[in-house]
Image (spheres, helix red, strand yellow):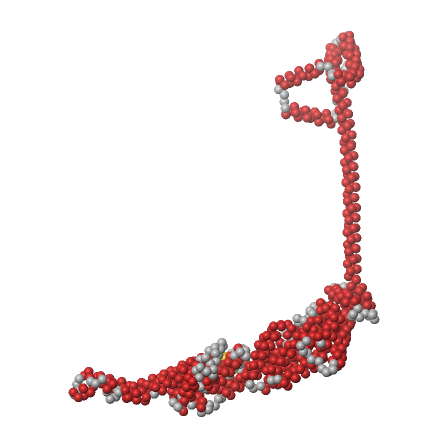
Amino acid sequence: MAAKASPPPPLPKSGAISKGYNFASTWEQHAPLTEQQQAAIVSLSRAVSERPFPANLTQENGTGLENGLSASAKDGNFGEAEAVDAVLVNTNQFYKWFTDLESAMKSETEEKYQQYVNTLTERIQTCDDILRQVDDTLDLFNELQLQHQAVATKTKTLHDACDRMLIEKQRLIEFAEALRSRLNYFDELENIASNFHSPSMAVGNENFLLLLKRLDECISYVESNPQYAESGIYLVKFRQLQSRALGMIRSHVLTVLKGASAQVLAAIRANASGKATVTEGVEASVIYVRFKAAATELKPVLEEIESRSSRKEYAQILAECHRLYCEQRLSLIRGIVHQRISEFAKKEALPSLTRSGCAYLVQVCQLEHQLFDHFFPSSVEDVSSLAPLIDPLSTYLYDTLRPKLIHETNIDLLCELVDILKVEVLGEQVSRRGETLAGLRPTLERILADVHERLTFRARTHIRDEIANYIPLNEDLDYPAKLEQSAAAIESTATSAEENTDVYKAWYPPLEKTISCLSKLYQCLEPAVFTGLAQEAVEFCSGSIQKASKQIAKRSSPMDGQLFLIKHLLILREQIAPFDIEFSVTHKELDFSHLLEHLRRILRGQASLFDWSRSTSLARTLSPRVLESQIDAKKELEKSLKATCEEFIMAVTKLVVDPMLLFVTKVTAVKVSVSSGGQSQQLQSVMARPLKEQAFATPDKVAELVEKSGLKSSFFTEGAIIANNQKQGRSFR
């Protein structure tokens, strides 16, 4: 009985085989083969199994194959021999023999494939080993990568720590520098104090201004940082040093200015005449040359002070320097200016004195302004800087002019003074030179205001005395004789240069004085003041003319009075027309007329004296009413003129018409008689004659009738008025 064949060794399990099997199974399920395809594969497998190995495979595996095949052949022969030689006794042995035979046959058939399987198994094992090594290597790489990341993280942490330390170091350095820079301001206290208290330190020292600048910086810093410890103490000490420095500057400026003043006084005393005058070409005189030299010495310090004048302390020391300068200059030129103005006052009249004094002060002010510009170039635009010097000098002129102005009564001279001050001095000289003479403007305007005040007072007095209270002379009221004389004078002087004078000689004196006064005041006074005076003058003039008209009406005839009034009112209206003002004034008065009624109600018990909530309270009861009334002299003049003209027209009409009515009645009677024909033959012949042959209508009778009516005299008077008005219309234009 043949030996039982051993079963084939189990295939080793590996990941690669499992993956390949799974892949093949998946492929088999999703891509099934047809019968034709399966037949083709079987044919290919047969062909492959029958083909020999390639030469390279034969050479490589020759030894192994020979050993395997020889072993297999031996085993096969031995098994076949056993199978052939086996003796079968029973069925069980047959089955066993058959099984062994079948196993041997199967083993013989699959032996060659088993060899390939073993080879592939070895290769798979090798691949699995390689994959295992690769996995181990990858694990090592992963571990190495983790270690690298750990190292990189630690390195980054180290770098970040280093960067933070560098930043912290830089911050600490900056903090130390900032702290050092802040402490420097406090540390400078000792340094600055030691320098300022040094005996060698003076304002002229080149380090003085540098120390002063550093001191200002320290004060500004400490002031802006009051939160620092002991900043208040340091600020007080810095202020003390600043006060000491500014005091040194003040003393230095005063010393230099006094030195220059002493040199000027010495030079003046050395002069043979012992006098100095501020005249033309004075720029080169000792009064100004010595001070210009002092300006060169003080210029650096004064410029430094002016550059910091925005601060309170420096503004005060600058103002103090201005005051010291003005005091020294005033001490030098006060006497000179006073002497010169006194000489003008002794030799010249008021207008000439005003003109000469103002011109002299203008020259002095210009020179002082130029000298001040050498010392304080940045302060020269400030008018108040030179005020302590210019005001006393200009006050000398004011004090000289004021007593003369107070006693001056001539309106013409006062008007001339206004023209000098307003046009020549303020309008031309001061306005043209601007800032140079700005210091004189307040005093000049003060003088002009005094002249205006005096002129206004004298004008009111003139209006009151010469116009409102004018007492006419007999020759002033000699109308119409004076009118006839005026007409004859106008005809005789029609071509002479004295035409206007002769024309207004015939005017009523208050009218001539009113027009003359207003013509002079129009350009001299302010519009508001002139308006009040003009309204008052026109009102009084109109009233004076009306009074004279009434007197003429009593002395001569009512018609002459009316013609006089019309003539002069027409002249007044025409002459005030060129004045571009309103002849109206608003008067305000307090009216207490309602007070009596309120008191009566209180006494009756109808109102309470202490009821503050009612309209009858004490406050409202005692409150006066303000009444405003507007008086327009021009309208009143027009109204008076219109009324007078209407009265004159009515009077002339009545005078002419009454005598003519009888004549017209007779003429009408004659015409009626002739037309009726009822009279006798003789009477009809008389009536039939022409009108001029009638007894009542002869030329002599008509001339006598006209003479009786006064028509000729009226026409003559009106013609004289018209002729006068034609000439007078050009009088004051």
Q: Residue furthest right?
A: 199
Q: How many marks?
A: 0
Expressed as whole percent of the image width and height from the top left, the position of residue 595 reads 50, 84
Expressed as whole percent of the image width and height from the top left, the position of residue 544 reads 46, 86
Residue at the (31%, 87%) spot, across then down: 706
Residue at the (54%, 84%) spot, across then down: 411
Visible residue check, residue 540: no
Residue 591, above or below 292:
below
Residue at the (32%, 85%) spot, across then down: 656
Residue 148, above or below 504:
above
Q: Quick check: 506 left or right of 333?
A: left
Quadrant of the rendered structure where residue 708 is? bottom left
Expressed as whole percent of the image width and height from the top left, the position of residue 619 reads 54, 80
Q: Quick check: 531 left or right of 26?
A: left
Please name whichever residue, 352 or 308, is drawn nearer the observer in this view of the structure: 352
Please name whichever residue, 207 or 498, is drawn nearer the observer in this view of the structure: 498
Q: Quick check: 678 left or right of 378?
A: left
Quadrant of the rendered structure where residue 44 is? top right
Residue at the (79%, 17%) spot, across then down: 64
Quadrant of the snapshot with the N terminus: top right
Quadrant of the rendered structure where residue 654 is? bottom left
Expressed as whole percent of the image width and height from the top left, the position of residue 259 reads 76, 76
Residue 209, above or below 661:
above
